[in-house]
Image (cartoon, grey):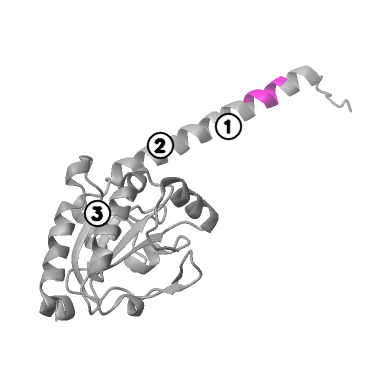
């Protein structure tokens, strides 16, 4: 009995193997690209209405939170009650937030003498980064670290994008003296002269009206 022994060439085998894996990689890449493209078509960018839909509604009590301040104290909704309060939801990694920073500081400087609380809740995890940025820009507005928790706190865990947790920044919440949301604003105006004008107008109304200031949405 004769055994047929196939001749083999190591170089050909390596070349054949290399070609196989190269073709396999190309198929995987094309398949992944197809999935990404399908997802992009199926997922539309969030609209402004989508953003406001996940924020605390007007007339609702601001969600409970407890964040450490840069000065070592703690901020909670209870600590802001008794006077109108502006909560700026913000981050050092957001260009629009950085654009709004000096407007927030001006808001605090203008309204603090009237007893208004203005506080920045930074979605950052490193207090040194926030403190350094504030020091460089002369910002004295009270700030706390949310450490990535803004989405869980202020949107009840809802996300504007299906593949990762996101939160619209900057966002401003105006509270009355009882902690109810009376005004919301997402984003910051590009024109410096018009920044936070609508927020200021609503805040002026709260400050000027003692009854509304105390009772707000009740």
In the picture, the disc for residue 186 is: 3
Residue position for label 1: 24
- For label 2, the crowd category at 10 Å Cα-Cα, with few meaning under 14, some 14 to 19 and many 20 or more, is few
Q: Residue at x 89, y 28 (%)?
A: 1
Mark 3 or mark 1: name the one nearer the start of the chain.
1
- For label 1, the crowd category at 10 Å Cα-Cα, with few meaning under 14, some 14 to 19 and many 20 or more, is few
Is 192 located above or below residue 204 in the figure?
above
CA–CA distance in space, label 2 to label 3: 34 Å
Along the line of sight, which residue is nearer the eye, 117 or 127? Answer: 117
> Residue 114 appears in which quarter of the rendering?
bottom left
Is 130 located above or below residue 212 in the figure?
above
> Residue 159 appears in which quarter of the rendering?
bottom left
CA–CA distance in space, label 3 to label 1: 47 Å
Secondary-structure class at tag 2: helix
Q: Is residue 146 magenta?
A: no
Q: Residue at x 63, y 30 (%)?
A: 21
Q: Position of residue 2 (x, y in %)?
A: 88, 25
> Residue 57 appears in which quarter of the rendering?
bottom left
Mark 2 or mark 3: name the one nearer the start of the chain.
2
Residue range (magenta): 15-19
Q: Residue at x 23, y 71 (%)?
A: 84
Q: Position of residue 115 (x, y in %)?
A: 26, 71
Query: In front: mark 2 or mark 3?
Result: 3
Residue position for label 2: 34
């Amino acid at each position: 009995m004769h055994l047929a022994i196939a001749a083999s060439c190591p170089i050909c085998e390596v070349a054949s193997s290399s070609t196989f894996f190269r073709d396999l990689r190309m198929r995987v890449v094309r398949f992944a690209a197809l999935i990404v493209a399908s997802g992009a078509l199926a997922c539309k960018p969030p609209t402004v209405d989508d953003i406001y839909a996940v924020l605390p509604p007007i007339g609702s009590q601001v969600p409970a939170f407890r964040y450490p301040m840069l000065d070592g104290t703690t901020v909670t909704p209870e600590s802001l009650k008794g006077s109108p309060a502006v909560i700026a939801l913000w981050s050092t990694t957001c260009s629009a937030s950085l654009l709004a920073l000096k407007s927030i500081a001006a808001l605090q400087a203008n309204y603090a003498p009237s007893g208004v609380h203005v506080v920045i809740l930074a979605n950052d995890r490193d207090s040194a980064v926030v403190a350094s940025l504030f020091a460089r820009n002369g910002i004295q507005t009270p700030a706390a670290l949310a450490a990535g928790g803004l989405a869980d706190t202020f949107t009840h865990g809802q996300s504007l994008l299906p593949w990762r947790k996101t939160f619209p920044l900057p966002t401003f919440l105006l509270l009355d003296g009882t902690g109810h949301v009376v005004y919301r604003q997402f984003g910051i105006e590009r024109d410096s002269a018009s920044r936070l004008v609508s927020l200021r107008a609503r805040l002026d109304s709260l400050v000027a009206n003692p009854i509304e200031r105390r009772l707000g949405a009740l």
